[in-house]
Amino acid sequence: MKCVTCRGPAVIDIRRHNANFCAEHFIEQCHRQVHKAIDEFSMMEPTDRILVAVSGGKDSLAVWDLLTAMGYIADGLYIGLGIGDYSDVSKEHARSFADARGLTLIEVDLPADYGFDIPAGSRAARRVPCSACGLSKRHLFDDAALKGGYDVLVTGHNLDDEAAVLFGNTLHWHTEYLGRQLPVLPARDGFPRKVKPLVRLTERETAAYCIIRGIDYLVDECPMAEGNRHLGYKAALNEIEKTSPGAKHSFYFGFLSRAADRFAEESAIDREELRACASCGAPTSAEVCAFCRLVDRAGGHLPITSGDTSVNVEIRPTRTGELR
Amino acid sequence: VKVLLRNPRRELEINGPITIINLLDRLDLNREAVLVIRSGELVPGDETLSDDDSVEIRPVISGGMA
């Protein structure tokens, strides 16, 4: 295999682009794809204050690395979920990445700050773990971004993530979600601007990016995610991709260009029905938001050690990062 | 060829020489869902591994199996 750019030995083949790349030109390719996503969807400006949701996994560390390499000023936000050793190790990966680059990592800890972990929250709320986890992360990401005065919240969602969610929402015709499955969600009352700069890269590509860049990410799977539907959708799409390279890209980007608008009205009506949570003020369709209900049911399973249950972020000094 | 698989972590011995593409086919793994790594570096699909080689087959799907 030869690199499509320099004809030197290639290290990776990208079948949907019908191209092979050496390490140097693969990194360039990743930069091109992220630049293109940012430009195409007007995701952010160079002067924006950016908060990256960081899990310690390949996607969040890759997007943080890519954005800082491109000159963006971006802090990280890590949420401790209390999933045993998995959370302990993921935190170490996030901290090591930030420390090595002099970046600021903000930390929120679900057990210490809200008195429950994901396993307990899942049981108490009778939600599957991924549901309790996603709900908690979305709430805490939004909260930290707004209260920290950030212009934009970046997540590491990649092409596989977006195609799999689209596949699931289409399979079950969750039309109320289809209109907002976009690479950019604009800021509005109670929600920060959210962007997904990795939508033009697959998971295989973000993992390859990390390996080539020497980024030490958490490889082990979340013990609570095993067997979830989302993984099944990803596997199904990868089977299609195997015989039809580019199918995932075509599915998702075809939806964006030719179908997403058709569902926008329904999503907008859904949003109009939101009001402020009586407990925390976050947008919700109920009197009390789903996160506060989760805290109410599950909180107290563990002792709160921070002494503040509202918003408790720990801003850790790094070698060169200034506190904000 | 010594092969390390993840999630769950386990090791296999496969007779070489064998190309990466054939190795993945033999293990019934989708190339879209894994990367092959040797000594910290990516190994391209057309490379042939010998008996002395030691590689990791790393799943790339979040929470995925390999």
Image (cartoon, rainbow, N blue to C red):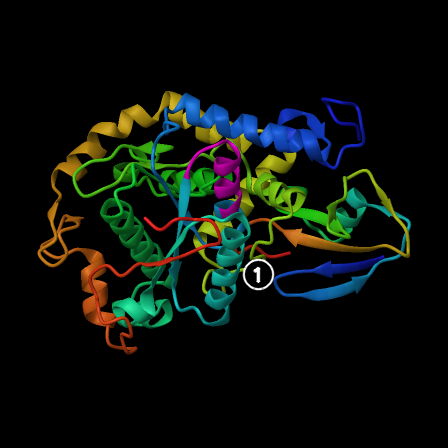
Q: Position of residue B21 (x, y in %)?
A: 77, 42
Is residue A284 found inside the magenta-colored segment of the image?
A: no
**Direction from residue B22 to residue A295 in the image, left or right:** left
Position of A257 with respect to A69 (left or right) is left
Q: Is residue A70 magenta?
A: yes
Examine the image and state in which quarter residue A209 appears. top right
Q: Is residue A109 above or below residue A25?
A: below
Report if residue B15 is visible in the image: yes
Name the residue: 64% across, 34% down: A243
Question: What secondary structure characterizes most of the magenta part?
Answer: helix
User: B60 or A169: nearer the eye?
Assistant: B60
- Mark 1, secondary structure of its residue: loop
x and y percentages locating residue A12 in the rendered image:
71, 36
Task: Tell which subunit mark 1 falls on.
Answer: A
The total of numbered circles placed on residues is 1
* Quarter occupied by the N terminus of chain B: bottom right
Visible in this render: residue B30? no
Give me the residue at 79% from left, 49% from top. Answer: B23
Q: Label 1 sits on what residue type?
A: Asp
Q: Quadrant of the C terminus of chain B?
A: bottom right
Q: Which residue is mark 1?
A: A220
On the image, the x and y values in percent for residue A264 come to 25, 28
Q: Position of residue A182 (x, y in %)?
A: 35, 32
Write down the region rendered in magenta.
A61-73
Question: B21 left or right of B9?
Answer: right
Q: Residue at x 76, y 39 (%)?
A: B44
Q: How many residues crowd mark 1 within 10 Å: few (<14), some (14–19), many (20+)?
A: many
| Snapshot quadrant of residue B9 | bottom right
| Vertical relation: A110 (above or below) B39 | below
> Is A74 or A186 nearer to us in this picture?
A74
Which residue is drawn at the image coordinates 17% and 55% (left, top)? A289
